[in-house]
Structures are given as C-alpha cells and as structure tokens.
Image (cartoon, grey):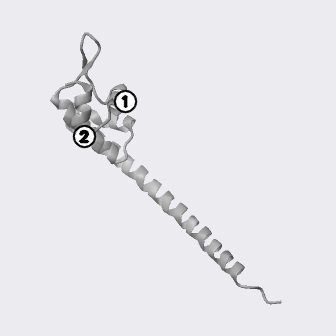
Amino acid sequence: MRIGELASRTGVSVRSLRYYEEQGLLTSTRSPSGQRHYTDHEVERVTFIQRLYAAGLSSRTIAELLPCVVSPSMENSDAAMERMAQERDRLSEHITDLIRTRDALDGLMAANRAHRESLRTPVAS
C-alpha cells in the first residue's frame, strides 16, 4: 500500500508517517519512481507507535523500545522495561513539578483575590 492508504488506515497524517520513517521507527520499500510502499504489518506498527506516543514517549525513546518488538528476547524485554520505568519516573517528577507550580499559582490567585477585595472595601479614615 502507498503512504496515503497507510495514513487513511491508521488515522495518522502522511507527514507523521514520513517523520516516523525519518526517525527510523517505520520502514518502507521504494518503487522505481520513488513512491513509498508499505505492507499490512506497518498498520500494526503505526498503531503501536501511536500508543507509545500517547504514553508520553519521545521518538528517541520509542526507537530504543522497538528492538523488543522486532527481535523479542528476555534481554530486549528487560531493556524495554527498564527504559519504560525511567520514563515513568521522569513523568512522575514532571507531575510533582506541575503540582508545585499549580500550588504556587493558587497562592498568587488567593493573594489577588484578597487584594481585589481590599479595593472594594473603603478604608476608614
């Protein structure tokens, strides 16, 4: 199938598919005129790549995980599990930072509310 059909079957843009190929996440064969051709296997691969992106993984991290899919082994599985654990830890740290930032914003909003209230109440002389 050509790139447009793969895009249609997976719900992924042609631009994204080209990017996946540039990043080494997806491969194609080329016709003599240079058109990309994919097999039905690539539909599953693109779907899997999309799941990894939805989990917050970067294309670099996805490339590190793909050997587990391409060449299943205990070693590749262990490496993939370790990499996913690292990503989970990174996301947890980011969530903690976001909560801290939200709490700081809540403090600023409370101070603003108090200030606004003081503007409504006339000061007695």
Q: Position of residue 113 (x, y in %)?
A: 62, 75
Residue, x 20% and y 34% (percent of image)? Answer: 43
The answer for how far apart the CA atoms under marks 1 and 2 are is: 15 Å
Q: Amino acid at mark 1?
A: Tyr
- Let me know if residue 76 appears in the view: no
Residue 17 left/right relative to 94: left
Mark 1, secondary structure of its residue: helix
Judging by the rendered image, the residue that carries numbered circle 2 is 48
Residue 36, above or below 111: above
Q: Position of residue 3 (x, y in %)?
A: 26, 26
Dot 2 alpha-carbon crowd within 10 angstroms: few under 14, some 14 to 19, many 20 or more? some
Q: Nearer the viewer, residue 125 or 80?
A: 125
User: What label sits on residue 19 in the rendered view?
Assistant: 1
Foreground disc of the pair 1, 2: 1
Residue 106, above or below 49: below
Q: Position of residue 16 (x, y in %)?
A: 35, 33
Q: Disc 1 or 2, which lies upstream in sequence?
A: 1
Dot 1 alpha-carbon crowd within 10 angstroms: few under 14, some 14 to 19, many 20 or more? some
Image quadrant of residue 64?
Answer: top left
Q: Amino acid at mark 2?
A: Phe
Residue, x 23% and y 31% (percent of image)? Answer: 6
Mark 2, secondary structure of its residue: helix
